[in-house]
Image (spheres, rainbow, N blue to C red):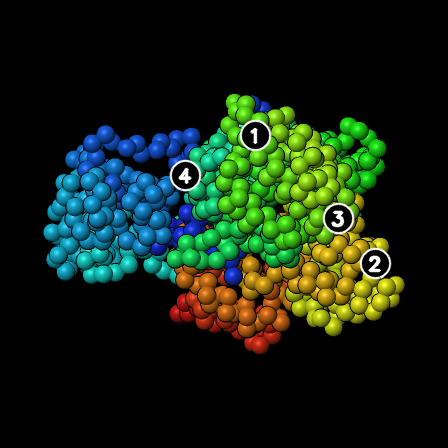
Amino acid sequence: MPRAAPLARARAQTCAPRSLCGAATSASTRGARAAPSSRRADVAPVARRRRASFATRATSDDAEVADEEPANWKYAYLYDGACPVCQTLKSALEGTGRGEGKVWYVDISDPAYDAKKHQGVTFAEAMETIHVLKRDKSEPLRGLPAIEALFAEVGMGWAVKLATMPAISLAASVLYKLISSNRLKIGGAMGAGVMALGRVGMEMRGEKASCAEGDECRGIADMEVDEDARGAEEETSFESVYAEGPRAILGAYASGGIVSAAIVNVRTGELESELITAPLDEGALLDINAVGSALRSLTKELKWQGSVSVALPGVWHADEKLGGTSVYAAMETLNPFEGRREREETEELLRNAVGLDVTVVTGAEAHGYGHQDLWGDAARRVKIGQTLDSDDPDNAMSGLTGVVTAGHEAVHVALFRDGVLRTNADFREADLAISWIEPEWANAKPPADDCEDEEEWKAWATRMAVHLAKVENCRCARGGLERWVVSGSAARNFDKWSHLVPKLSVVQAGKAAAPLIIGGSNSLEGVRGAAAGGSFRFRYMADIRRVRSAIGKEVGRSPQLVSAIQLRELFEKFGGDINDDAIDLDAFVRMVAAMGVRLPEDEVRELVCDIDVQCESSVTFDQFETWYKSVIGTEVAQVLHTEAAVDQVLEEEMGTGRAVVLQVGFTSCMPCKKFLPYFEQSARDNREKCRYVRIYGNENASTIHLARDRLAVKSTPTFFVFKDGVVTHMHSGSNTEKFDDAIAEQVGVLPIGTYEAKWNPPVPTEATTV
């Protein structure tokens, strides 16, 4: 996707912004950001992905050495390794030499940090106040008791005693704040002593020990990005061709208590890294924070800063709360519109947890994508109807194909038509999630691989037959399945039970099930399939944003402000062939083409699936309006995760008269976090005149490039206002009055020049005396 040409490119900086907001760092750094209201160069395949030089700390990744657990530690100090101020304090404690082997320094900013292994202390809790854990696992020490125990252990108990002297304590606290906000630099023993004294003094007086006491984070540190780690998108224009999507994707597959991942070239299907794994605790497949933590760990190990696509078992959603615990249900049981919303919410949660652009597919979908031959010339997308010939006996995905994965706990199904996923598949009639685990199947568990008992295999085959027949009776599958592709663990012993299913299904459902063929059973197919499905989803969503933009331009308004009346008028231009409220699918495709948006054939069919949820080969206005609202979204100040997404917003607002307000922050910037509610309220108040979006300038390679190289951000938060893609205003700091004046001037409430006169007055020159 191209960058909006009018957005001026700043000269490349040798240093990039870096937050110093230590103890008050946002929980988003650890993947615990609040739930939503929510990369690039060609290289040859290699056995091991070349290490990126994206530095999140003062030292390079290659130079980093994890703090190893001492054999006989007494105290574990939970510190923020991403905060230079916290690093200074840690160095002061280590420098005494008195605590060696007795103090274990645990970096809570490390993606591998696991609260379960540290007495349940979460990242967010550790950032609120200092935590010191005791080896006997008794109650953790917090605040001043933690400081007293820790400092005494390393021979700095004097700092606690001196801090009781008001004058010394106050002076040290002031210096601490100046060092924390990077307004004063003190090194060596003096700096360490001041840090220790100041930290104790603030704790004793009950002050928040934040590393960002002002209204902005001023720190500057190098953040270099290896271009190979960005998974390039092709540079294409909005007007001429459809989106290409990322060239390479990190594909991940969650199954059997582990998450497997590798970097996949989605043009060829070749792996560009080794296949690596991260373990999950029992039951953690239904814990989105655990999966997010595993993905963070995998992306860090592979030094990956591009797009991620993860296959989850069924793509769960929190169905309800029982006793404070989420009960999860498979997404296949939902209405397709609800399923789409749940998938998008899951994706946004994982984006926030991983800090990269993430898309989600189900395990069954991943095996479907992995089973077919997707790899090769990208132009295959416009020829898909020709390449997937239903008369070709070697083509396992032509026609309507079902893909099934099953274990004792769950069965998951995905439907494809000619290789394109049917996202509108509605399995509520099959009641898969509930009926699969009914008591009647207690004795029909999947037998062990070495089982030779035919009765056990027959019981398992009966269970499969019942549920495949249920799916085939669903509305979305009544056109007749060509075949079932059995994948995952169910495929391992395919020959022992598959021949029984057609016979049993006649007894259970009155008709034979579609023929069964064997799919892939290993995680490699799941990883490659997740990457392939993610590739389609990334480019499809990019093109849908182009459709959204085209609709806005057609009616002459920002896409977010298009009214139901304007949508109706657009719809009726192409209506009348069925009735006043519906058009056939060909007319709908003509409507999209008439607005100048070119879509490849597989995306056209996916778009039709998204809208025609009843599989009636027509589109009603209600369906069209519901679909449009879903692609617009409801966030008042949307978080964007790539510079391409920012460019898309600028493109959509070109010529609408509506300004774009962009906030650039850091994941660990306390002033940014404090300002967010005000920013969101301003977005609500100025919705008609401005569109508000925000990015984290240190989140990933794409946002680093945008913040550092294109916008030349030096501190956060920094605010930009764009009109028709051109920057018309910029300022830094979380001063609310300053922000209000800037917006008021940009929307015409205040005269041009008011802001400059008030906030940047000219410095008076000294009068010349005679």
The local secondary structure at tag 3 comes to loop
**Pair 3/2: label in front:** 3
Question: Circle 2 is placed at which residue position?
Answer: 584
Number of the front mark, 4 or 1: 1
**What residue sits right under mark 1 in the picture?**
455
Give me the C-alpha separation between circle 4 and circle 1: 33 Å
Q: Earlier in the sequence, mark 2 or mark 1?
A: 1
Q: Which residue is mark 3?
A: 478
Q: Residue at x 51, y 72 (%)?
A: 741
Any part of residue 646 in sight: no
The residue mark sitting in front, 3 or 4, is 3
How many discs appear? 4
Q: Whole-Å distance between the Cαs marked 3 and 2? A: 20 Å
Q: Answer with left or right where residue 202 lies relative to residue 686.
A: left
Please tell me which residue is depicted at 31% across the width and 55% down the height of the picture: 128
Q: Residue at x 34, y 33 (%)?
A: 66
Say above or below: 732 vs 131: below
Mark earlier in primary sequence (4, 2): 4
Q: Which label number is shown at residue 493?
A: none
Residue contact between numbered discs 3 and 4, judged by CB atoms under 8 Å: no
Q: Residues within 10 Å of mark 1 (few under 14, many from 20)?
A: few
Q: Amino acid at mark 2?
A: Asp
Decide if residue 1 is on the left or right side of residue 640: right
